[in-house]
Image (cartoon, rainbow, N blue to C red):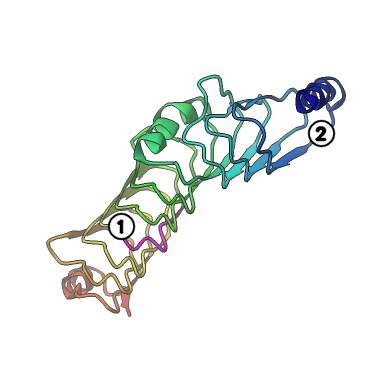
Amino acid sequence: MQFWRRYRRWNHLCRHNSWSLRELVLTRVTCISGFYLHLLAEKLTKVTLCECYQVHEPAIIAPNLKALTIKYCPMARFHADTHLPELKSLSLCSRNFTAPEARHLIHEMLHASPVLETLNLYGCAQLEEVRVDPGELPCLRQLDVSSCAKLTRVQVTSKALEVPNLSHNDELQYLCLDLRHTVDLDLSFLKGLTHLDIRCPSLQRLNLRGCSRLTQTGTTVSCPNLQRVILHGTSLVFLARHYLNKQHNVRYD
């Protein structure tokens, strides 16, 4: 009861006295299982939830929020009431976040956040698959799905994506990228990768160092402006020959 009195008093202050609040950080709030946050502060642009171990399905309504970070919380998905129309950056690290939750996040929830530029799913230990279909996340420039221990499949089609981070994913087997603005792509040491399909007219540098399981039959690279390819530790001699025959300025390592 004492907690709820304090919470109601804090909620009252947030509604009436926090119009100049710019950043809100909630750490180790372990005494609530439901989480409904209605943020009215006009200048509030950044919220962080960290180690809130009872937060499974937060509802966050924040018309002006630009950046949201939720890390080390057991959440699986956002509540249907969540409303983040101006969100530009979302970072989510949860041990309960799996492929169906990722699909719901991208296809359903973030459809209402059309200006999102950065999506960070770093370290989601149970995440098996990430898919971004044509037309989804139209402003996305940075996607980080690194260090996801169970990630086996990534398929992304994007006209805006510039910086995809897929590093430290030893179980990743299938990767299909159809991009338009990526210039430098580092796929080094993806040791489990067996299927690679890259279509990217803007790509100039490609690092496949240590991708030892890639073969000619499982690899398709359609990048007409490629200038440098790193193939050390692979058997992709055919790739070097293919581009050498077409582009004499391509460098290989």
Q: Position of residue 235 (x, y in %)?
A: 19, 75
Tell me which numbered mark, 2 or 1, is placed earlier along the sequence: 2
Q: Is residue 165 magenta?
A: yes
In magenta, the rendered stretch is 163-171
Q: Residue at x 42, y 26 (%)?
A: 108
Residue 152 position (above or below residue 62): below
* Farthest front residue in view: 1
Q: Residue at x 42, y 50 (%)?
A: 181
**Left of 114 or right of it: where is 22?**
right
Q: Amino acid at mark 1?
A: Leu
- Circle 2 sits on which residue? 21
**Left of 204 or right of it: where is 10?**
right
* Farthest left residue in view: 217
Looking at the rendered structure, the secondary structure element under dot 1 is loop
Residue 16 position (above or below residue 176): above
Q: Quadrant of residue 25?
A: top right
Q: Position of residue 218 (x, y in %)?
A: 16, 60
- Circle 1 sits on which residue? 172
Mark 1 Cα-neighbour bin, 10 Å: few <14, some 14–19, many ≥20: many
Q: Quadrant of residue 98?
A: top left
Q: Position of residue 21 (x, y in %)?
A: 81, 33
